């Protein structure tokens, strides 16, 4: 850790490129706002989309592979030095990686040949996988090799999404989309199962609590195995009858897993309870997908619980917490950040309700507005945190 801190101190350029979370978390927040505004303009016909995707496929791609890809990049570039004890990617190499991500966002809205757009868009995730594999292998950190594998699958699914779109397949519901979504949900189940009980335990123990979360164990491995089986069935056969039942079983398994982490005791600190809310949305997403498979819920609404809910809330929670911790700020969410969390939750439930409403236009616009408020608030609150040097020690 001393060498990591030394590498960061030696960087004389903009503070934005002093650590992996800074450019990618800020880019993710800004893109979450801008991409939603663009989606509304595409949806209402006020703006044409010149790229290779239809508007619905672009919307799905940019929130899964664009926004989420940036968060994953910031998270792993910050976490890998802690995992392996090796030096972080900083300075101009980090600026180059974030520049490749931006190039991908521009490319998918450009009238270029589809194969060139694919190469440009995959340049950042492929480079990221190479960096992670190099660090994990060099540090002999075998415990986190599955994380590297899932991110590699995520990059592969992005390429598959482009190929399906070029062949005229509805990429927003194709194999690439399902594989990418499955990879991210598995990452949330895997990493969330480590950090949520750990952060909760630390917070409760600091306040003298004796009843603490149950640590990761054999039962968690069983839940992860059920999750992997469910997501494999989702990728291979989303219309198979038993896939819906697997989703329901998986959702209940995650509800049980969450119940062991003492989330109800964390109401005094939004930075902790938001992690439990995010994991609850993962469980709810699995349950609503199961109901949709049985014809009891609308599929688009169920899919948004997983994407906007589980992924959106988890990533917002991780970005806000990690940014505070790595800039030496107090791990506490004030009223502004709490409002961002609540706004995002209301956005998710408005989108879910829109699936059951005959004329849902108003609810869709309400959901989009709440989403923009949540991430716009994050950008306003975290711009100075992410672009300025960390606070002095002590």
Image (cartoon, rainbow, N blue to C red):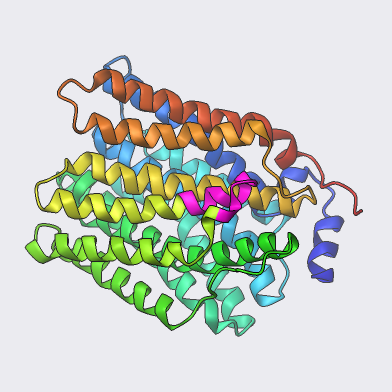
Provide residue 43's location: percent of width, then percent of height. Answer: 27, 23
Magenta span dominant secondary structure: helix
Q: Is residue 36 left or right of residue 135?
A: left
Q: Is residue 133 above or below residue 66?
A: below
Q: Is residue 82 left or right of residue 119?
A: right
Q: Which residues are magenta?
A: 265-277
User: Residue 387 magenta-drawn?
Assistant: no
Q: Is residue 262 visible?
A: yes
Provide residue 374's location: percent of width, then percent of height. Answer: 52, 31
Total numbered labels: 0
**Residue ID at (58%, 55%):** 265
Which residue is more in the foreground, 138 or 223?
A: 223
Image quadrant in which you'd find residue 79: bottom right
Provide residue 151's location: percent of width, then percent of height. Answer: 44, 64
Q: Is residue 40 above or below residue 127?
A: above
Quarter the N terminus occupies = bottom right
**Residue ID at (59%, 45%):** 25
**Residue ID at (71%, 45%):** 332
Q: Is residue 113 visible?
A: no
Q: Is residue 34 left or right of residue 265?
A: left
Image quadrant in which you'd find residue 139: bottom right
Provide residue 8's location: percent of width, then percent of height. Answer: 80, 58
């Amino acid at each position: 850790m001393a060498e990591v801190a030394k590498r960061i101190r030696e960087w004389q350029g903009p503070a934005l490129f002093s650590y992996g979370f800074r450019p990618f978390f800020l880019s993710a927040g800004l893109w979450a706002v801008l991409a939603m505004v663009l989606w509304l303009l595409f949806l209402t016909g006020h703006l044409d989309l010149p790229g290779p995707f239809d508007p619905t496929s672009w919307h799905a791609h940019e929130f899964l592979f664009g926004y989420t890809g940036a968060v994953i990049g910031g998270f792993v570039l910050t976490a890998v030095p802690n995992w392996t004890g090796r030096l972080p990617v900083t300075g101009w190499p980090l600026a180059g990686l974030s520049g490749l991500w931006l190039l991908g966002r521009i490319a998918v809205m450009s009238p270029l040949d589809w194969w060139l757009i694919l190469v440009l868009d995959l340049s950042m995730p492929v480079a990221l996988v190479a960096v992670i594999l190099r660090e994990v292998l060099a540090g002999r950190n075998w415990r986190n090799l599955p994380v590297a594998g899932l991110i590699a699958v995520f990059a592969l699914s992005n390429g598959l999404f482009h190929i399906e779109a070029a062949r005229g397949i509805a990429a927003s519901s194709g194999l690439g989309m399902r594989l990418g979504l499955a990879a991210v949900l598995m990452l949330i189940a895997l990493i969330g199962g480590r950090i949520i009980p750990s952060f909760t335990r630390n917070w409760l123990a600091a306040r003298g609590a004796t009843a603490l979360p149950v640590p990761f164990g054999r039962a968690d491995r069983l839940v992860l195995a059920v999750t992997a089986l469910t997501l494999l069935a989702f990728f291979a056969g989303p219309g198979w009858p038993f896939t819906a039942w697997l989703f329901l079983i998986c959702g209940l398994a995650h509800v049980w897993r969450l119940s062991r982490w003492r989330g109800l005791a964390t109401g005094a600190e939004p930075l902790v309870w938001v992690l439990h809310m995010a994991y609850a949305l993962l469980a709810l997403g699995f349950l609503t997908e199961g109901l949709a498979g049985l014809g009891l819920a609308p599929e688009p609404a169920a899919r948004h619980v997983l994407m906007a809910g589980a992924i959106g809330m988890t990533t917002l929670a991780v970005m806000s917490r990690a940014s505070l911790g790595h800039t030496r700020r107090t791990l506490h969410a004030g009223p502004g950040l709490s409002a961002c969390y609540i706004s995002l939750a209301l956005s998710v439930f408005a989108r879910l309700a829109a699936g059951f409403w005959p004329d849902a236009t108003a609810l869709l616009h309400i959901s989009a507005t709440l989403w923009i408020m949540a991430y716009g608030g994050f950008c306003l609150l975290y711009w100075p945190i992410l672009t300025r040097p960390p606070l002095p020690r002590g």
